[in-house]
Image: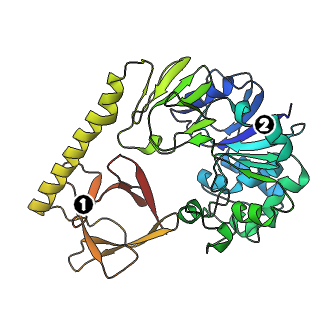
Amino acid sequence: MNKIILLNCYLGKLPWYFDFFLKSCETNPSIDFVIFSDDEEEREIPKNVKIIKFTLEDFNSLASQKLNLDIQISSAYKICDFKPAFGVIFQDQISGYDFWGVCDIDLVFGRIREFMTEELLDNFDVISVKDSFPSGYFLLFRNNSIVNYLFEKSKDYKFIFTSNDNYCFDECGGAYDEVISGINILDVPTETESIHHVLVKEQNNIRVHFDLFIIEGTPGKIKWDNGILSYKNEYEVLLYHFSSYKNNIFAVQKRWKKIPKSYYIDKYNVRKSSNIFFAKWTDHINPNFKNFLFRTDMFWSKKLNVTALRNLEKGQYSYMNRTVFIGKNAKQQNYLCYENLENQFDLTQMIFHSKYFFNTQTKHYYRHEKNSFSQVFLDGNLIKYSKL
């Protein structure tokens, strides 16, 4: 059997969903996991999981040594760009394994070996569980020198690794909309060459497999039962990615002292009971009521016209390859422009929801973030625009 080890580097307090991640690691005893973390909380760890104390300073020192570059990143999130190089940076941990991989901790695993079969592992060198681009949250690499040093095939890897900015190097350089729509990554203008560019360019030298083994978003109807993860009681899946759920404004952050042997992941809640009444409340009644309150707040905020938004910094903000511009008019009220800078949409602060503001023309609403803001959709999901 091919030996597999999965690596993660998470700096900061480990979040609520980490316990769900650990429980699903435990039910995959033939896979080893190593987590580099500076969290000090004592917790029960499965036998196949190792947590190594690690800091951002440790990462900078180790990455500089292994990559022969001056690495001085200041944000833990930037480590995502280094994932394709983990086989070199953490080479001492992967000795003796046939495959090493990267995985995030906002995951719940099903039966990994049910999808990472011996046939698949024997016939491919890099395996993505997303069909349109490399899945940076779970990506497997054959443990040999050719594959481990693939990242060096990018003409930009030195620039990316020595910069503090994030370039989505572990996936597709931010060109998500384009590659999901079916455009070849090599035909998409991107700021830098990502690992996706490399995998496509090197397809005659290495064997790459793209497939869809996962569930994302907030679809609900997911069940985890003693290590088996299923959707609608019809399809078994490799993993569920909490990426949208954890940021959704309607979602409940479930904190259990002990993760049960079986539970359900609804759109906005995680429950032990099989009683679907709870799902109807959290997935439909409660979100509809909250959206009604937001619409009411927008109506009165616009009608009274006393809370023009003025505290957003002027400049460009981006989400992946999308860019918007925040400006100020003669009255110092913030306005928003999309790609056509001639169309300016005034922004107004909500009266009753102090963390939120809205576009008075389109009725889109947004949430204040640090050095950024997030657009909120009716289903509670967010897209975050960060200051450039």
In the rendered image, residue 383, in percent from the top left (x then y), is placed at: 43, 56
- Helix, strand or loop under label 1: loop
State which quarter of the image contains the N terminus.
Answer: top right
User: Which of these two is toward me, 138 or 347?
Assistant: 138
Dot 1: within a 10 Å radius of its alpha carbon, few (fewer than 14), some, or many (20 or more) residues? few
Q: For residue 26, which quarter of the picture? A: top right
**Cα–Cα span, label 1 and label 2:** 47 Å
**Numbered circle sitting on residue 70:** none
Residue 381 sits above or below residue 321 on the image: above
Is 255 on the left-hand or right-hand side of 154? Answer: left
In the rendered image, residue 25, in percent from the top left (x then y), is placed at: 67, 28
Q: Identify the residue at the far bottom of this view.
A: 342
Residue 94 visible within the image: no
- The residue positioned 12% from the left and 55% from the top of the image is 300
Please state which amino acid type lies under the numbered disc 2: Ile
In the rendered image, residue 279, in percent from the top left (x then y), is placed at: 36, 28
Q: For residue 133, which quarter of the picture? A: bottom right
| Residue topped by disc 1 | 363
User: Which of these two is toward me, 174 or 93?
Assistant: 174
User: Which of these two is toward me, 303 or 288?
Assistant: 288
Please state which amino acid type lies under the numbered disc 1: Lys
- Helix, strand or loop under label 2: strand
Is 272 on the left-hand or right-hand side of 45? Answer: left
| Residue topped by disc 2 | 5
In the rendered image, residue 168, in percent from the top left (x then y), is placed at: 62, 60
